[in-house]
Image (cartoon, helix red, strand yellow):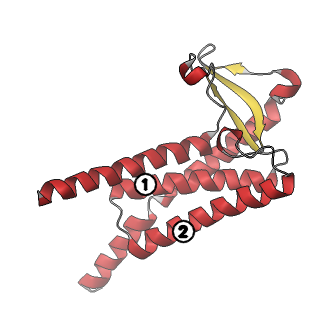
Amino acid sequence: MTEFSAQSSRRRDSRLLPFTLSLIVVILDQLTKAWVVQNLDLVAISGDHIEVFGQFVRIIHTRNPGIAFSIGSELPELVRNVLFTTIPVLVIAGLLFYYFRHNPFSAAQRWAVAAIVGGGLGNIIDRIIRTGGVVDFIDVEFFGIFGLERWPTFNIADAAVVVGGILLIAGILIEEARGHGEKG
């Protein structure tokens, strides 16, 4: 193996390895959602919940037909299904195209992208295989901050997208700051 092909292979492996996190996120997301569906009635039906840390964190069973914070839940079902499946697929495809085509990402940013992809796929799977919307189940007390007693219920996929997004943006900002610091 030539030095060039060895470097190319290492570079390809360093690009692909973070997507093990995507797979882990999808598996954990789908397993937890399946458990919730199997073991807890919808909150609207029974108010069933499991307290994890008292009232601070509860496991409940809700469905979100919209996107984040139930945005778009009032749209007709066909429009929701098309929009809220197609748009995430296009975003993930664009992100992956950029990721593999240009690869400006640091190692930490690659893992953040993988978290976003895994979370996005987890919720897309829900929209395709489950009726009534995406299964949400993590219910956290928010102590009246922003007028919310409880944060809107979410799932592992949502958490992966948000944490991955925050880490990706922070990584980009840090890289930008380093770049400007080196020039000035």
Quarter placement of the N terminus: bottom left
Examine the rendered structure and indicate whether residue 105 appears above or below residue 159: below
Residue nearer the viewer, 167 or 68: 68
Examine the rendered structure and indicate whether residue 118 appears above or below residue 16: above
Crowd tier of the residue under label 2, counting other residues whose Cα lies within 10 Å: few below 14, some 14–19, many 20 or above: few
x 56%, y 50%: residue? 24
Residue nearer the viewer, 85 or 59: 85
**Dot label at residue 12:** none
- Can you tell which of label 2 and label 1 is closer to the viewer? 2
Can residue 21 be seen in the rendering of this structure? no
Residue 105 falls left or right of residue 44 = left
Residue at label 1?
111
Q: Residue 148, percent across and down?
A: 61, 22
Q: Secondary structure at mark 2?
A: helix
Residue nearer the viewer, 70 or 117: 70
Residue 155 falls left or right of residue 72 = left
Q: Residue 32, percent across and down?
A: 68, 39
Q: Residue 33, percent across and down?
A: 72, 40
Q: Residue 41, percent across and down?
A: 84, 29
Residue at label 2?
94
x 77%, y 61%: residue? 82
Can residue 40 be seen in the rendering of this structure? yes
Q: Amino acid at mark 1?
A: Trp
Residue nearer the viewer, 119 or 74: 74
Residue 3 falls left or right of residue 82 = left
x 81%, y 49%: residue? 75
Q: Toward which corner of the image does residue 144 lie, by quadrant? A: top right
First-in-chain label (2 vs 1): 2
Q: Toward which corner of the image does residue 71 lie, by quadrant? A: top right
Q: Amino acid at mark 2?
A: Gly
